[in-house]
């Protein structure tokens, strides 16, 4: 063969390959790690893998929480497209507890500004337990950040209202928009915590004494306690988280709930303080902003993608659900969802 036809043949083959490559859909070349099939499988695998873990114990400093069946276990993923993937007990309403904290902080940002969180509460992690009184003495901001009790009670006190009833109604309505669903208070849990929350009352008075609380201390603690008693299912909590993942637009209702620009501030403080004295270990292993609660719920947010939720009542010493942490870490690792991973 003389050189000219060979060159032409090579060019023709290259062209044909390029045309072929172009016509093959992207998914066929690289399987989508976020496909519905894969998410369905990962959620049930996470549930199956960790359902027999018996480590830890229910919270019992709120007596009613000790009565919640310890075997309950739900795993849910809701994507920014509104897809829902669940396994296990994802329709059981549990008390949201401290997973409420970022959502109330979001309401304060929306009503006032993100700067109010910095100036009137703080954004520094404490490295101490969620209910630490020592932290109020160690940090110049006292309330530290809105993810610990001190800062969360301060956040409640910053919700604009002329009465505690109005303040709570606002918080409830806000959570319902985040969840695109009706929510109810778990009254037994509320009564149980209201009868035993002296530590939080102490924190509120310490803040009020230095001008770091912005409503009556006992009223603020009562609204905070009621907020912590709002019941959510793992599925509803995952929708709330997916609203953050979707930059403030609820993927189920399609409605904008909060300003997009505020979400990154909220996720930053969740990453730094959402797991209290375990925030470092969580960032190390999961690499996702998240928030835990002593009711056994945890929400983790994959910005631009989804929320991953685990719920199971048995907690470790830091007050974080062991099964929920394991399930979320597993799913996040399989998806390559770590926010610090350049290849994600
Ligand atoms: N309501 C609980 C408290 O104030 C919330 C604590 C938590 O979930 N970590 O103690």
Image (cartoon, grey):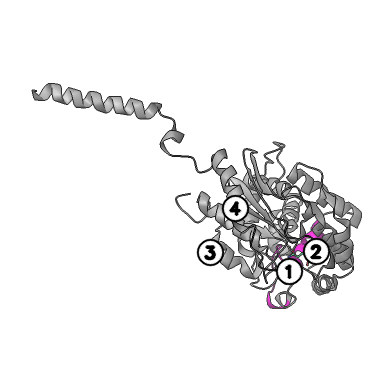
Total label count?
Answer: 4
Whether the residues at callouts 4 and 1 have beta carbons within 8 Å, the answer is no
Q: Which residues are magenta?
A: 137-159
Q: Which residue is mark 1?
A: 143
Q: Who's the residue at 62% across and 68% down the image?
A: 278
- Mark 3 secondary-structure assignment: helix
Q: Nearer the viewer, residue 237 or 155?
A: 237
> What's the CA distance linking mark 1 and mark 2?
26 Å
> What's the CA distance linking mark 3 and mark 1?
25 Å
4 or 1: tag closer to the N-terminus: 4
Q: Nearer the viewer, residue 57 or 3?
A: 57
Q: Is residue 323 left or right of residue 58?
A: left
3 or 1: tag closer to the N-terminus: 1
**Picture quarter with the N terminus:** top left
The residue mark sitting in front, 3 or 2, is 2
**Spot occupied by residue 268 in the image (x, y as percentages of width and height):** 61, 58
**Spot occupied by residue 246 in the image (x, y as percentages of width and height):** 63, 43
Q: Is residue 163 left or right of residue 23?
A: right
Q: Is mark 3 within 8 Å of ligand 1?
A: no
2 or 4: tag closer to the N-terminus: 4
């Amino acid at each position: 063969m003389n050189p000219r036809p060979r060159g032409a043949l090579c060019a023709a083959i290259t062209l044909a390959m390029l045309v072929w490559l172009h016509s093959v859909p992207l998914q066929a070349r690289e399987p989508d790690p976020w496909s519905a099939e894969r998410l369905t499988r990962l959620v049930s695998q996470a549930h199956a893998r960790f359902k027999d873990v018996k480590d830890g114990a229910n919270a019992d400093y709120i007596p009613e929480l000790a009565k919640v069946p310890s075997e309950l276990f739900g795993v849910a993923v809701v994507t920014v497209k509104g897809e829902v993937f669940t396994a296990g007990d994802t329709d059981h309403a549990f008390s949201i507890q401290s997973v409420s904290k970022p959502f109330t902080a979001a309401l304060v940002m929306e009503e006032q500004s993100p700067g109010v969180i910095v100036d009137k509460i703080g954004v520094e992690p404490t490295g101490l337990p969620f209910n630490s009184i020592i932290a109020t003495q160690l940090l110049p901001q006292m309330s530290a950040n809105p993810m610990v009790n001190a800062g969360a009670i301060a956040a409640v006190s910053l919700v604009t209202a002329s009465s505690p009833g109005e303040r709570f109604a606002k918080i409830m309505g806000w959570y319902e928009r985040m969840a695109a669903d009706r929510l109810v208070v778990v009254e037994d849990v509320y009564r149980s915590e209201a009868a035993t929350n002296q530590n939080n009352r102490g924190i509120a008075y310490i803040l009020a004494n230095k001008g770091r609380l912005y409503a009556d201390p006992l009223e603020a603690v009562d609204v905070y306690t009621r907020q912590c008693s709002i019941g959510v299912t793992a599925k509803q909590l995952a929708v709330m988280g997916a609203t953050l993942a979707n930059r403030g637009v609820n993927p189920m209702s399609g409605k904008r709930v909060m300003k997009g620009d505020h979400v990154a501030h909220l996720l930053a403080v969740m990453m730094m303080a959402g797991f209290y004295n375990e925030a470092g270990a969580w960032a190390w292993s999961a690499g996702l902003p998240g928030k835990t609660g002593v009711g056994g719920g945890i929400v983790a947010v994959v910005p631009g993608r989804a929320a991953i939720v685990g719920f199971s009542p048995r907690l470790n010493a830091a007050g974080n659900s062991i099964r929920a942490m394991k399930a979320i870490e597993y799913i996040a690792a399989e998806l390559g969802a770590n926010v610090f991973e350049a290849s994600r």
